[in-house]
Image (cartoon, grey):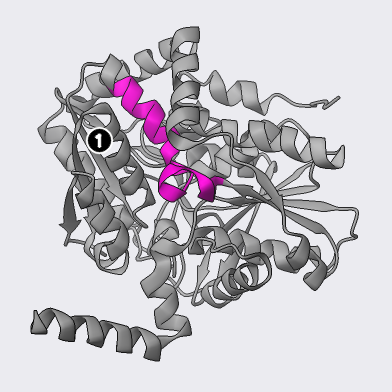
Amino acid sequence: MIETNTNYKTQILEAKSGYFGRFGGAYIPEVLKPNMDALSQVFFESIADKNFVNSFKKACNDFSGRPTPVTYLENLSKQIGGAKIYLKREDLNQTGAHKINHCIGQIMLAKRLGKTRIIAETGAGQHGYATASVCARFGMECTIYMGQKDYDRQRPNVFWMETLGAKVIPVQFGSQTLNDAVIAAFKDLIAHPEETHYLLGSAVGPHPYPVLNTWFQKMVSEEAKEQVFKIENKLPDYVTACVGGGSNALGIFFDFLDDESVKLVGIEAGGKGKTPGEHAAKVSYGKEGIFEGYHSYFLQAEEGNISDTHSISAGLDYCGVSPILAYLHSEGRIQFDAASDVQTLDAMKMIAKYEGIILALESSHSLAWAIEKAKGLSNEEIILVNGSGRGEKDLFITMKHLQPESLQFFMEKQISELRDE
């Protein structure tokens, strides 16, 4: 029997005002208020509708392949010594990440709202890839905004999005990363509010997006909680996830929120150092503010402007964090730490070598933390890591760092062959 102690889950799901403590809200132009109000109404009506909930679960099972398993990383755990490390396998979803969960849910809401056009932002490309997939599946027009830097470094996912029929627009202003893609998408929504649904890719933004995407992702922890308990006859001692905006973290944390014995740890992008522009650790180094429609922690320069960010992983290269995570951190329910680019690459190599799993660079941040934490724990303790995505998309990033000569040879050979053709 699994017992719970507090009521964070209820607080979050019943926050129809859009506020979580002092965080959240909907700081938006008046032209967008009808869109957000309509989306909020249809969302809360839909999750109370058994037919909608059953249809959502069926789509996740039939199209995405849920439930995803948990895998005991036995070889890695024994190599490290200490705690057992388990991996929740969201990398095994259709399109290779957790993003497909809220994409299925949101496109079903868009259909209920009578929308005919979907727009989205993407960083690492996994959200864009998932959005393009559900648009193809549900027959919707699709436009995806992607910072020019991410467009270049995540080229495999750009190719798949375009193959699926999406129009991918590289954003060339600002830092040309995820933050600027979000801004470009909101500009599009302002210009086309009636026919467009903005399929926002994380638990950020104005209400109702934070609670909406959390609801569509919470099945990750619902599955994992049962799976670990069935194997070990106990809950994990630690649950950890990487944190960009916060969708995968809230997905794996949610069903453990009221279990006080389970420590929840979010891992941010420590990047190359602590200097502004060298990392993307919002909770660790950011300040409270209002940006992109919500109140949370943001990385800001002295004068209050949003500062540049950096992460080896495009999906964590974002300036803000979910207001729900900000609230839970202020309550002391979730701890935060950071993993550097170097630690992340080392973790990615270790899980490949010892477990035969190619893990996304985003998820490898939390695995890096788990590896270090496990060393100081007993072998009776359990760490559950959310494997939020698979790493094939990172091919050109990881090769550049790990096998630069091989990458150069491969690229030169491909260019030579193209010229010969």
> Relative to 133, does residue 395 appear above or below in the rendering?
below
Image quarter of residue 81: bottom right
Q: Residue at x 28, y 23 (%)?
A: 110
Q: Say which quadrant the N terminus sits in.
A: top right
In the displayed structure, does residue 171 sit left or right of residue 137? Answer: left
Residue occupying the point 24% across, 86% down? 413
- Residue 100 appears at what percent x and percent y? 42, 39
**First to last magenta residue range:** 90-110
Q: Where is residue 214 in the image (x, y as percent from the top left)?
A: 51, 32
Residue that mark 1 sits on: 136
Q: Where is residue 272 in the image (x, y as percent from the top left)?
A: 49, 77
Q: Residue 262 occupies which quadrant of the picture?
A: top right
Q: Quadrant of the C terminus?
A: bottom left
Residue 43 belongs to the span the image colors magenta: no
Residue at 50% x, 64% y: name it: 361
Say left or right for 326 vs 122: right
Q: Main secondary structure of the magenta part?
A: helix
Depth order, front residue of 365/156: 156
From the top left corner, tell me how far across and down residue 270 is, in percent: 53, 68
Q: Is residue 342 above or below residue 186?
A: below
Amino acid type of the residue that numbered disc 1 sits on in the rendered structure: Ala
Callout 1: SS: helix
Instruction: Indicate left or right for 109 with 158 as reference.
Output: right
Residue at coordinates 36% horizontally, 73% vertically from top-left?
396
Q: How many marks?
A: 1
Question: Where 15 sits versus 125, above or below?
Answer: above
For residue 134, what is the image quadrant? top left
**Observer-nearest of 226 and 218:** 226
Q: Can residue 310 be seen in this view?
A: no
